[in-house]
Image (spheres, helix red, strand yellow):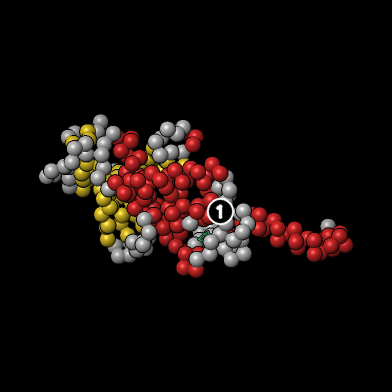
Amino acid sequence: MFAEDDLLPISALQHLLFCPRQCALIHLEQVWAENQLTAQGRVLHERAHAPGPESRGNRRIIRGLRLRSFTLGLTGQADVVELRRPTGRVPPGERTRLHDLPGEWLVRPVEYKRGRPKQNDCDRVQLCAQALCLEEMMAVRISVGAIFYAQPRRRQVVPFDEPLRRETQESAERLHTLMAAGATPPAEYAARKCRACSLIDQCMPKSAGRSRSARDYLDRQLKQASASLGPESSDEAT
Ligand code: SF4
């Protein structure tokens, strides 16, 4: 079990699965740069978090709900949590009762994403982490959620099966290990991935592959530049 102060952001799981170095640059070194892709994603999330619960037929929609899991050591915010009336056969443990809404409900997290479904599991792991937080907070089982992709404007249903739950738990453990180590992994340049990375200018993946961090690399470059100027040049500069 983790303490409140040790909780890490759910969003860091996505960064970790995309690239551990990007995760460390953002969450250890507080380096951040916005590109067109991250700006589009931010606007989409701000719209999804617009306040106020909504009712749509048999559904109640809650936006921007704060989440946390002391088991996984994660905290974050759900874009949307849908409460649905159970219909047909529902697996045991999935129905829950809420203080201020009569009857029984199913809980379904929904995440909004710019762009298209990805080849890797990072979006599904992020959504599954939200579901595991909700399960812990509400003492309910959640078997399925959804990701809404802007291109095409379509929902993808995500079952929270055992392999995805295991991958999410292992990713949370790797994230805590990375943060506890406090060291940024070296860059591993991969053209397609690095060209899409918002931190390519700060990371300098072709130059900083062996360095401990982007800051180390910059420090070394500055030291070399000072040494090559020599003492007279330094006096002129002051
Ligand atoms: S530029 Fe490449 S190596 Fe560097 S953080 Fe981004 S994805 Fe990782």
Tell me which amino acid carries mark 1. Answer: Pro
Name the element at disc 1: loop
In this view, 176 is above or below 14: above
Q: Depth check: 77 or 190 in front?
A: 190
Where does the image place residue 137, in percent across and percent down from the top left?
33, 35
| Residue at 32% over, 39% down | 134
Q: Quadrant of the N terminus?
A: top left
Q: Depth check: 231 or 34 in front?
A: 231
| Residue at 32% over, 44% down | 131
Where does the image place residue 102, in percent across and percent down from the top left?
19, 33
Instruction: Specify the quadrant of the image occupied by residue 108.
Output: top left
| Residue at 33% over, 41% down | 132
Instruction: Specify the quadrant of the image occupied by residue 201.
Output: bottom right
Q: Quadrant of the C terminus?
A: bottom right
| Residue at 26% over, 36% down | 140
In the image, farthest residue toward the left: 88
